[in-house]
Image (spheres, helix red, strand yellow):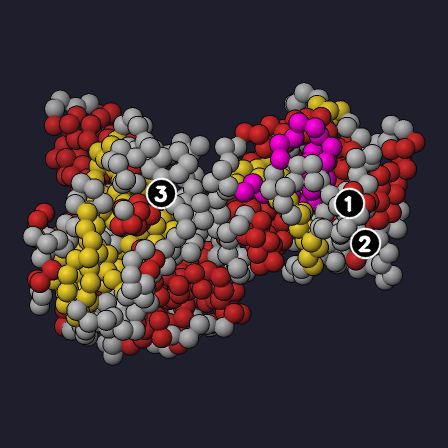
Amino acid sequence: MAHVTFIHGIANKPAAADLLRIWREALANSADPLPLGDLGVSSSLIYWADLFYENPDPDVAAHEGVLENTAQAVDGGGGAQLPTPRTAEEARFIDAMRRHLTEMSDAEIAAGPPAVAVNPQGALERVPLPWFLKKPIMNTFLRDVHHYLFDVEFAPPGRPPARIQQTIRRRYVEALGAQAITGPHVVVSHSMGTVIAYDCLKRVADCPRVDGLITLGSPLGVDEVQDKLQPEWRRDDGFPHERVAGGWINVFDRLDPVCGFDPKFANDYCRAGAPVVEDIAVQNEGAWRHSITKYLRQPAVCRALRRLLHL
Amino acid sequence: MSGEPTLDEVREQAQKSLSDLRGLCSDDDVRAAKALVEKLRNQRDYELMGRLAEAVSRIDPKDAKNRRLYAQYLIDTGKATAAIDLLQPLARRLPKEHPEFAEATGLLGRAWKQIFFDAGDKASGGAREAVKEAIKAYRVPYESDPAKNTWHGVNLVALLTRARMLGMRVAPDLDPPAVAAQVVAALQATPPAKRDEWFLPTLAEASLGLRDWTAIDENIRRYVAAHDAKAFQIASTLRQFTEVWDLENRDERGRALVDMLRARLLGLQGGEARLTPEELQRVRRQPVPDEGRLEAILGTYGAQTYQWWKTGIERAASVAAIRQKMGNRMGTGFLLRAGDLGREPADELLVLTNFHVVNEHGANQGLQPADAEVVFEAADPGRAYPVAGIVWTSPVDNHDASLLRLETPVAGVTPLPIAAALPVIDDTARVYIIGHPGGRDLSFSFQDNELLDHEGPPAGRPQIPGVCRLHYRAPTEGGSSGSPVFNSRLWQVIGLHHKGGKIGMPKLNGKEGTYGANEGISIHSIVAAMRG
């Protein structure tokens, strides 16, 4: 039996079972439907939102639909605060990542800027949403990426502290190893989940092998992220061939701010110097292009997954 | 995990309660029984509900709510006139301020409405009398408290509109659009905290009376496209729209609306749609509504929902009735391509049904081939194909399957596609049956079933060598023998329906216990057996 392992991205999420259902239904509701269950393909989800949040988001509907009127619906739920750097290196990282998203200062954002900046510079400034929605997205993205890449110890209220990178890596390795899989095994990752998937497949020695990787709305093209994946990552040998037997398909929307201005990976993740990652551009609907359900409903994503699963 | 008991648990409690009520029972036992009557109503197990309501009535015949629920059982099991005989004295004896008065009077209207629903000729004297009486019944509680009794009001609007369409001058002092406007205003004035689950369906239906399609579409969308829409509510709206408002016969816009509701209903857990062959033919011919309207009613992914429904309708055209020559329907079968079964000539079209429907010697009350004919009622109801012979068969205790060759090639019907694999078992797995349930009438039934288990990969352990069984559960009743079992999204055949609806079916794969389940045979195990 073929298997798909999903891994989610930034911000708080519904409970794992609800989130897995939402992702599967999004694929099944595509214009080129890919109902995994009907096709005999099992699926599971690596869940890590509980490391950052006390409880799952009870507003499941916000994650199912295409509304863009709440922080949850635009990957900003949970009320994350900007990370506090512990070292100069962390401060530089956070500052650089922030500049990818916006040129505006906190004071300017707080002053209530227009929904669309007159001369947009940063990725988030291209997003026609009000800043009361964009601010939580920015905070969440910077916090989650920073805490993972710098392996920060963190504890949401009521939970014991955990080293973020170590804990998520362990979950990832255990989840991939737990499946009794006889067919192709493909990892489908979104947003921050793409960084986790890549990090484990490239850099964690006991991570099981898979047959394919799909990254959706990924920040892996951002220089600062790549720097933190060294020394295993090299531009000419960045492909995780150690643990990915088949292809890597990267899907992006040019107006997805999380991909920044570096949405294509073919030249950044070469195999023996040759570009092998397949970059596919899609156009999601609406103002918030990073939404996972919008990506999963893209026929191009369904076709890519079908191909990697040999369906 | 919900705290609501399952249907099996409620049934078990009801059986115990029936036993308790036969003996020396306490007040607590009676109270518990009364609560169970309502639970059985909510689970739509009307037969058991009626038995328990009867038992309660013998102990406490004056309990107005139980008598009203008893009447509801009578209506929902086809005994509307008996319900009227029960409800009329009940409504007479209850003071108008009693909370059950409006309920009982409204149900009296519902009983008369049911008689109108069931009338083949809606212009007949009996049907017209039923409309008149229903209007009279709904009018009383509505006019006594229009702000509160909005469900009576919306039925009043629907029936007045239909009565006017029939040329009847019943309640000439009432103007349907004016009553509709009052009902809509009353509903909109309801504080959000006091709006129950029927608020949106009632508002949507009342909007029909306004004849403003923008408002109608918007109000219907608010509950139809909601992520937590309930199948029983949409089924109720659909019944009103077709049987009372007669939307299908009004115009293209009304027909499209009904189709969209059917599409949404079938996509919901527990959804079921029944269509006559004529309705199926009409839906197949009907143009697809424009994308904007699909989105306006069904939500952002309305076009996909509708396309899925249309695919199901197309599949129904390949489902056939197996009839005794010039006689009754004995079962269901479906068209397959020989090549998909590993047979030659690959393009020959064959019909698969159960062994117990057709077999060489008429065993298990089946038909012999010479006595059987096959009719694709949704495609060409006037054409019967005699059966030339059985090309492969497997007895009831194995695959319960017979593959039929027809005397003349089937024309104008597309063979059904076979799925590549059985669905993965999880708590969202569902299958669909297209068949003719109960053999009562000519309607096609599209039933959503929860897929409970199967003996296929990866964890299945078949108990009969070479036979892979599927268990699934319909909310209402089993489909007829020989129906195709489809996966839920792609409408591909995964099984042959074999037997249904039995309580006490032993679970599969060595699991302990029994449950109420239908049973099918995996198409893959049938194909593997054919290939030898």
Q: Which mark is residue A131?
A: none
- Provide the residue designation for mark 3: B451
- Disc 1 versus disc 3: nearer the observer: 1
What residue type is disc 1 on?
Ala
Disc 2 on helix, strand or loop?
A: loop
Q: Where is residue B100 shown, x and y percent of the image?
A: 27, 45
Disc 1 on helix, strand or loop?
A: loop
Q: Which mark is residue A261?
A: 2
Chain for numbered disc 1: A
Residue extent of the magenta highlight: A184-209
Residue at x 34% of width, y 50% of height: B494
The image quarter containing residue A119 is bottom right
State left or right for residue A36 relative to residue A124: left
Disc 3 on helix, strand or loop?
A: strand
The image quarter containing residue B263 is bottom left
Residue at x 79% of width, y 51% of height: A267
Q: Which mark is residue A272?
A: 1
